[in-house]
Image (cartoon, coloured by chain):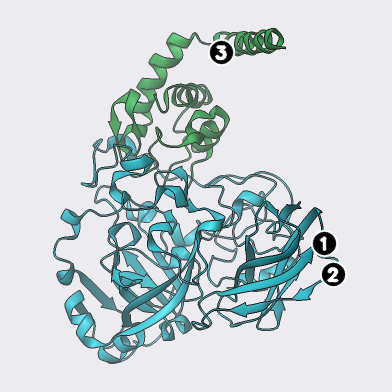
Chain colours: A cyan, B green
Amino acid sequence: MRKINKINSSRRNFLAGSATVAGAAAAASVMPISIANANHTDGGAKGLPSWTGWKKRSALIIHSDKGMETHRDAIGNSVITPLRHVYIRNNMPTMSDAQIGNRNNWKLKVEGVKKPKTYTLAQLKQLAQTTEATILQCSGNGRGFFAHKPRGSQWKTGAAACLIWTGCPVSAIIKDCGGLASGAKFLTATGADMPAKLDPKKALVERSIPIKAQKDALVAWEVNGVNIPNSHGGPLRMVTPGYFGINNVKHVGKLAFTAKESSVKYMKSSYRISPIGKKGSQYPSCWEMPVKSWIVSPLKSAKSGNVVVSGVAMGGTKKVSSIKVSVDGGKKWQKAKFTGPDMGKFAWRRFVFETKLKPGSYKIVSKASAGGKSQPKLRMENRRGYAHNGWLDHGVDIKVS
Amino acid sequence: MVLILKFRNILFATLFIVSITSSHSWGDVMKQGLQIFNEKAGCAACHVLKHAGSQGNIGPNLDMSKDSKNVAYVKDMVQNGLGVMPAFGEDGILTPAEVDIVSKYVAKVAGK
């Protein structure tokens, strides 16, 4: 299985055309109308769905009640994204308090180890703890820039956030379970959020990532200093540093160390980076995130004279090493400086670039490097609009007056 | 200028109505669309749509999504599916005519 950043080298080899997603069976036709307890029927305060009404409406673009994007200038300048501003992308309905029950009694089943066990959240808290800053980024972040308009939410930059998680390291769980069973090649996490009457093969959120990711992974109960809200996958969420959002399975109920990737649709056919017009499990899965950056200020206009360009840069699974900015659409690049705390290779760095600009129009772009690789100029064309890290589309057109 | 704009709007509206009524009347579309939504396709099990009285919560609330008012977008989704949503057209769950009708129905009533 190739990694996402490897496919970038052949990014322009994909063919143009149209494609479809394989459909699931019409299980819906025999299901009752109301399935879960969470109330999804009213618009909630200020246009937010009631189950996540605590969010800050003005920080969000509402694509649907299952897809809410952070405005480009709403990630803030403090490295860590305020929780009320963080995007929402749900494959399954958010679990309600009634479904979750007592958070400390939440269960995590562990398989594929020498001594399989089931832990309660309270037991995990006593086993071991770690705290890590990581980027949560939807695989389709940047889909809104693709010319062929792939189906799905048209995210630009705001399906991404930098967050601090506290939880139990997966490595500690493996050790406590006597080590890995033989033949384990993947870390497979399963969500407990699928309504019972759906078909697991088609609807279960179960994701497998290479076993090497276990050394950085954790099962988290806290984010940015609070219990993980239900709408972000509480009380327990898989956190896979450096990997796309879908692998950070919400409401995680099972960890399995498996010889093969999961065979459910969300692993086998969804989230595959295939050429436009093609699909299938032979294409790379949305796993490791590639190097990427984008400007958050200014976004439209600036006063002439000293102009401070700022943004964020990330390295995916590698530490971001440098960031360059161009005010002429990529003809001439200058080094920008990182500012703010370095919260480790899985967090993004905030960058600033101070320049003097005369009145006029400018195309300001940024280009990050990590692990010896820099962002490509163009997007990697693909059917579903995944993994966009091209610097040109992420640039901003600024009028200086 | 205002008159020209009004005339243009009336022209577009007329063309739109003619295009709809050429195969089905709006009454047919609404009646059959509602029936497909709630029964044959079972959209109601997974989506909120106030007009249909449905409260499913697997997929997006169709009254809250601006894409739901775009008939081409809805038709594409019904035809091809997405994520857990079945490909009603591609998999032959609905006939092409039914895909067309239910898509027009959803786009017409979403958010109302």
Q: Quick check: marks 2 and 1 in contact, CB under 8 Å? A: yes
Q: Closer to us: mark 1 or mark 3?
A: 1
Q: Which residue is mark 1?
A: A328
Label of residue A318 in the image: none
Q: Residue A292 location, x and y as percent? A: 63, 69
In percent of the image, x 50 and y 83: which residue is there?
A: A344
Q: Position of residue A172 (x, y in %)?
A: 31, 88
Q: CA distance from mark 1 to mark 3?
A: 49 Å
Are discs 3 and 2 located on one and the same chain?
no
Mark pair 3, 2: CA separation? 54 Å
Query: In front of the other: label 3 or label 2?
Result: 2
Identify the residue at image location x=40%, y=75%. A164
| Picture residue at 46% right of the left edge, 52% below the top | A59
Name the kind of residue labelled 3 in the image: Ile
Quarter where residue A252 is shown: bottom left
Apparent side of residue A184 relative to residue A4 in the rendered image (left or right):
left
Please state the horizontal and vertical placement of residue B80, each as a whole percent of the image. 53, 40
Which residue does the numbered mark 3 point to in the structure image?
B20
Chain that bears disc 1: A
Disc 2 target residue: A332
Q: Residues within 10 Å of mark 1 (few under 14, many from 20)?
A: some
Secondary structure at numbered mark 1: loop
Above/below status of A234 relative to A148: below
Name the foreground residue: B54 vs B5. Answer: B5
Give the x, y percent position of residue A274: 63, 58
* Lateral position of residue A161 relative to residue A280, left or right: left
Asked whether residue A140 appears in the rendered view, the answer is no
